[in-house]
Each structure stands twice: as structure tokens, then as C-alpha cells.
Amino acid sequence: MRSLQADRGMGTLIGLSIALIVFLLWTAWFLWAPISRYETGALVGITRDSWIVAEFPARAWESIQQGQVAYIHITPQNASGNSQNGGDIPSEAATIIPAIVANILGHPTNDHFQVTLAVQEYSPALEGRFSGKVDVEVERVTPAILVARASGQLVDTPALSINPQQ
């Protein structure tokens, strides 16, 4: 009994305080942390006016709009069109160039549509032959919104499907 009376519960109080702080930090992250969603397309080429042309699947038609932020991932190629070490691993790391969606070229045809991109900063990787991909940031959401979408609680967006046959 003396042991119980001498114990003031300080260890329990410290443990509960730490747990409460961790819970509050996790709740703040869950409600306010931005998560970006990207649509990915393939680089088609570069125009005479230095616009980058990219091709996206038709499913991205409603998501991509003029003025959105894009990131161009360029993989340099040698004259034969393959990377210098056999095609699987590029000879140098891919260069990432920020860009803005400048224009959407027409409606989707053959399950694809094209977009022109305005490069934000010059890169020597744009000279010569290159290939690569383009990621366009189409949305920023919080983890709370993703959970609400997955559960079907948000009316304006369809519920996420885990089953690939649906």
C-alpha cells in the first residue's frame, strides 16, 4: 500500500501526454497535408517554337487544364535512338525540367490527345535526341479527402475501386 501511495502516477501522465501529442500531430497531418495526384504522358517532340509536345491517354482529358504545373523527365539518347549502354539503363540520369501546360491540342482521338508545354527554364537536355515522360499535377488533396473518396462519402467524386474488374 505504501508503494501505491508513494506513486504519484507521473510515468502514466508522461506516457499519456506523449500519446496525446502524437495523436494531435497525426490528426493535423491527416486533415491538412497536401498529396499531389499526377497524370503521366509520353514526350512526343519539340516544335520549332520551342514548345514541348506530350501525348496523354484519353482518361486524363478532363483532368488536364491549361496553366497546370508539369514536370518533364528527359532521358537523352544517342544518334541511333537508344541509350548508349543498350537501351535499358540511360547513360546519364534523367533531367527533370519544370513546365506549364500551355495548350490542349484538340479532343481525344484513338484514345490519346496531345498537349503543348511551356518550359520554365532552359536545359541543354532539350537539344538533340531525347525521350521521356511528362507528369502533370492535376490535383492536390489531403489524406482525409482520399479516405472520404474511398469510402464513397464525397458525392462529387466516385468511390475508389480496389477490384480491377469494376
Image (cartoon, rainbow, N blue to C red):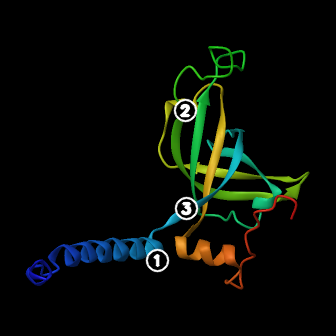
Q: In the rendered image of this protein, does residue 88 appear above or below residue 159?
A: above
Q: Which mark is residue 94?
A: 2
How crowded is the residue under tag 3: few (<14 C-alpha within 10 Å), some, or many (20+)?
few
Q: Quadrant of residue 15?
A: bottom left
Kindly identify the amino acid type of the residue bearing the numbered disc 2: Ala
Q: Residue furthest right?
A: 110
Q: Earlier in the sequence, mark 1 or mark 2?
A: 1
Q: Position of residue 98 (x, y in %)?
A: 51, 48
Question: Quick one: SS at disc 2?
Answer: loop
Q: Quadrant of residue 38?
A: bottom right
Real-space CA distance between mark 2 and mark 3, rounded to the nearest whole angstrom: 21 Å
Question: Quick one: SS at disc 3?
Answer: strand
Q: Which mark is residue 36?
A: 3
How crowded is the residue under tag 1: few (<14 C-alpha within 10 Å), some, or many (20+)?
few
**Label 1 sits on residue:** 31
- Tell me which residue sits at (58%, 51%) in the image: 118
Q: Position of residue 95 (x, y in %)?
A: 52, 35
Real-space CA distance between mark 1 and mark 3, rounded to the nearest whole angstrom: 14 Å
Given this view, does label 1 or label 2 mark the residue nearer the observer?
1
